[in-house]
Amino acid sequence: MRGCIRRPFSGGQALIPLSDIDRRPFRFPLVTALIIGANVVMFFLELTQGQDFILRWAVIPAEISGGHKLVTIFSAMFMHGGWLHIIGNMVYFWAFGPEIEDAMGRIRYPIFYLGGGLAATIAQVMMNPLSDVPNLGASGAIAAVMGAFLVTFPRDRIKTVVFIGFFFTITFIPALVLVVFWFVLQLLSEIGSIMQRNSDGVAHMAHIGGMLFGVIAARLFELRRGAGRG
């Protein structure tokens, strides 16, 4: 969604997850890499074809509510609103995606990813069904992957860059702490937007919808071999 996961933490502070230090995938995360590649290609098309392309393939809630341009529910989850948007999303995705791909397998994982993006879009459209503001971004689907990680590997430590003002350090944060903190901030931001009747340009409801889908559906998509026991 527009502006998603570019500034996951506020107050002059930011956390950038890099990788899971407690486990490595059994094989190369091919599907995760292909999804990242699809996002890059789509972003290149946005840059070269401009605003008309964005308006054609982004989600416009009012159109979805009317049953029109439903294909944009899927096309929009591969689009981004700028360089910081796509870089931030893909960094988060690469930090959490490979282990979830390994736990679900290369068939179930992309179905889960698209399902997460669908749930995120539905949540955002339901929050403001008459909006004519284009929504785009992979954040909702990535939030679903993060939700699955929370369920599947809650005790794993995530190597994370922590920025405080102009300074930064690298530390290891339990996935449970990192993901729950991120989710609570999305929830508080959405509540704040509702109470103040304004928007910061971030589709927080899409994040929440995607995360809840990931938490609920993760175990249904895991392979039986039990790779998901963290």
Image: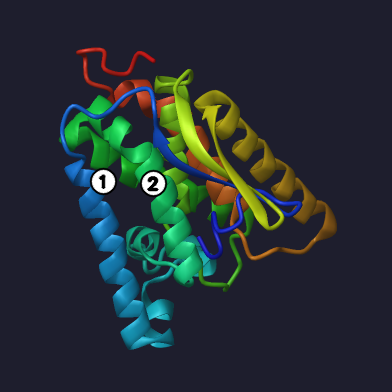
- Identify the secondary structure beneath mark 2: helix
Front-lying residue, 63 or 119? 119
Residue type indicated by callout 2: Phe
- Position of residue 87 relative to residue 8, above or below, is below
The residue lying at 21 percent from left, 40 percent from top is: 29
Return the x and y of residue 150 as percentages of the image width and height.
48, 26
- Position of residue 127 relative to residue 75, above or below, is above
Question: Which quadrant, please, contains the C terminus?
Answer: top left
The label shown at residue 93 is 2
Q: Is residue 103 left or right of residue 215?
A: left
Cα gap from disc 1 to disc 2, whole angstroms: 8 Å
**Label 1–label 2 contact, CB within 8 A:** yes
Callout 2 environment at 10 Å: few (<14), some (14 to 19), or many (20+)? many
Return the x and y of residue 154 as percentages of the image width and height.
48, 20
The residue lying at 36 percent from left, 72 percent from top is: 57
The residue lying at 37 percent from left, 69 percent from top is: 69
Type of colouring: rainbow
Return the x and y of residue 42 as percentages of the image width and height.
30, 70
Badge 1 or badge 2: first in the primary sequence: 1
Q: Is residue 66 visible?
A: no
Return the x and y of residue 208 as percentages of the image width and height.
57, 42
The residue lying at 22 percent from left, 33 percent from top is: 108
Based on the displayed image, in which of its 4 quarters is residue 106 positioned? top left
Residue type indicated by callout 1: Thr
- Identify the secondary structure beneath mark 1: helix
Q: Is residue 169 left or right of residue 10?
A: left
Front-lying residue, 117 or 66? 117
- Position of residue 33 relative to residue 219, above or below, is below
Callout 1 environment at 10 Å: few (<14), some (14 to 19), or many (20+)? many
The label shown at residue 32 is 1
